[in-house]
Amino acid sequence: MTATETEQLRSLAEKHLWMHSADWAQVALEGEPLIMVQGQGMRVTDSEGNSWIDANAGYASVNVGYGRQEIAEAAYEQMRQISYFPQRSANPPTIRLVAKLAQITPGSLSRTFLSSGGSEANETALKIARAYHHRRGENNRHKIISRRGSYHGATAGVLWLGSAEGTVLSDYDPSYPGVLHAPQPNSYRCEYESSNATECATRCATAIEELIQTHGAETVAAVIAEPVTSGPGAIVPGDGYWPRLREICDRYGVLLIADEVITGFGRTGKMFAVEHWNVVPDLITMAKGMCSTYLPLGATIARQEIADEFTGEGRCFQHVFTAAGHPVPAAAGLKNIEIIEREKLVENAREVGAYFRCHLQALQEKHAMIGDVRGIGLMLSMELVADRKTKACFPVEQKIPRRLMAAFKKRRLLLRAHGNVIINLSPPLCVSRPDVDEIVALIDDSLAEVGKELDS
């Protein structure tokens, strides 16, 4: 693509494209957006021929990496056969996909409602949870408990779950009714100032039980949580947390929803992150890695015992999206899962993720601004601080995220820093040790550059 064509596209983007959580005027001032035209593995190429490393795999979503011809061919072949479906009919790839999900998810999770992405999947889970209790005559169970700092999507209902740092909600008042917030089991910044991850996990789980008791179990429909929390940066709870959540939900008749939109399909070194704790939720939501975002695809899978409440005269689940169960993303998703299994990418995430984390911890010893390195598998984060001892954040006026991203961009490393100050690292699951070495070296150089600026 010529320079003229690139500028024409940027001009059109500035005039017409409403980008994700971005100010198009500021983007244009920075000579962006970058216009990506090709990808292979963890690398993408822009319209000017420059090669970049995507160290976060899109939105922690391109699990099998860019450029998988097999997935493109599966989608194309499906479009040649049947591109959509008549009302009240099904199609082979959709049926095969939901059967595959029943096979690879834990326990009796077995009936799936497909959607177009994570927000829709979580909205679907909330509707199922509330409708389930209504089917059983418990009409007052409408409240949903989530955790502060979590992120469950951007549509009108799930937007209010968790309230991840940096999310401005005042534009969208009034808040969604019946949403309650519990503490995040973040042992680095525990709300209870716990001394270790186990203590933090116990106190944060107990806080959920206390919320249920305070509001009355008869009013609470579900608890929704990410097994490893993405918003505050790859928060892995203490080992007792998820088993305790399962125990609490069972005790009070509350449904447990695991949001595996990011963590699912191998990201943490297990096919699904709840498997680290041998817990079977009542519902799991998924998207992103399910199709490696080659096409829009999400899903909500329920335990058979939950789904059974939606069969019988007048009891069906009144819910539909036009693209739900679309055969083309389903075909792509099946091929994506086949690649994950065939190439043992779950195992690779576990092994290379451990290697990656070890090297990030080596950076922590070298750079005083790295306060914490955390995560599991290939879902990792670093939290930067002005003072490691006190965990004090950098003053906003120092603009550390902007400085870091400028340093990353100079090195053609696609990596974001946000909040005070989190760097998330979720590369494709096909990443290799040499790839990790390259990413770590670029981060090392970038931190050194920003550190030198702060010292000058």
Image (cartoon, helix red, strand yellow):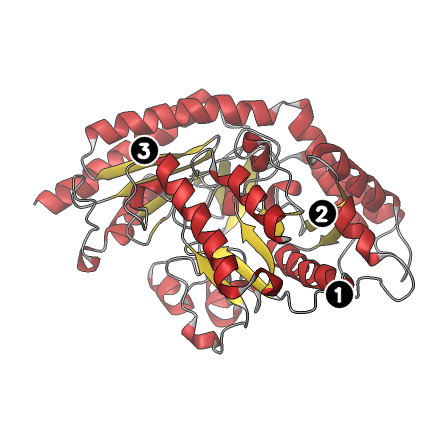
Please determine whether, in this image, residue 14 is positioned above or below residue 294: below
Res 195 → quadrant: top left
The residue at the far left in this view is 456
**Mark whose residue sits in front, 2 or 1:** 1
Q: Can you give x and y, in whole percent of width and height, for residue 345 in the image?
A: 59, 26
Name the one closer to the observer, 418 or 185. 185
Q: Can you give x and y, in whole percent of width and height, for residue 317 in the image?
A: 80, 62
Query: On the rendered structure, is 125 left or right of 276?
Result: right
Q: Can you give x and y, in whole percent of width and height, for residue 286 in the image?
A: 63, 46
Q: For label 1, count other residues whose C-alpha is less than 10 Å away and answer few (under 14), some (14-19) or many (20+).
A: few
**Mark whose residue sits in front, 2 or 3:** 2
Q: Can you give x and y, in whole percent of width and height, for residue 324 in the image?
A: 76, 57
Q: For label 2, count other residues whose C-alpha is less than 10 Å away and answer few (under 14), some (14-19) or many (20+).
A: many
Task: Residue 335: give its label.
Answer: none
Please determine whether, in this image, residue 108 is positioned above or below residue 270: below
**Mark whose residue sits in front, 3 or 1:** 1
Give the residue number, with chain letter if any, for mark 3.
442
Q: Amino acid at mark 1?
A: Gly
Quadrant including the C terminus: top left
Q: Earlier in the sequence, mark 2 or mark 1?
A: 1
Task: Residue 301: give its label.
Answer: 2
How many numbered discs sit on the rendered protein?
A: 3
Q: Earlier in the sequence, mark 3 or mark 1?
A: 1
Q: Amino acid at mark 3?
A: Leu
Q: Residue at x 50, y 28 (%)?
A: 431
Work out how far the residue at label 2 is from the one at label 3, CA to CA, in angstroms: 40 Å
Question: Could you say whether the residue bearing mark 3 is in a helix, strand or loop?
Answer: helix
Give the residue number, with chain letter if any, for mark 1.
137
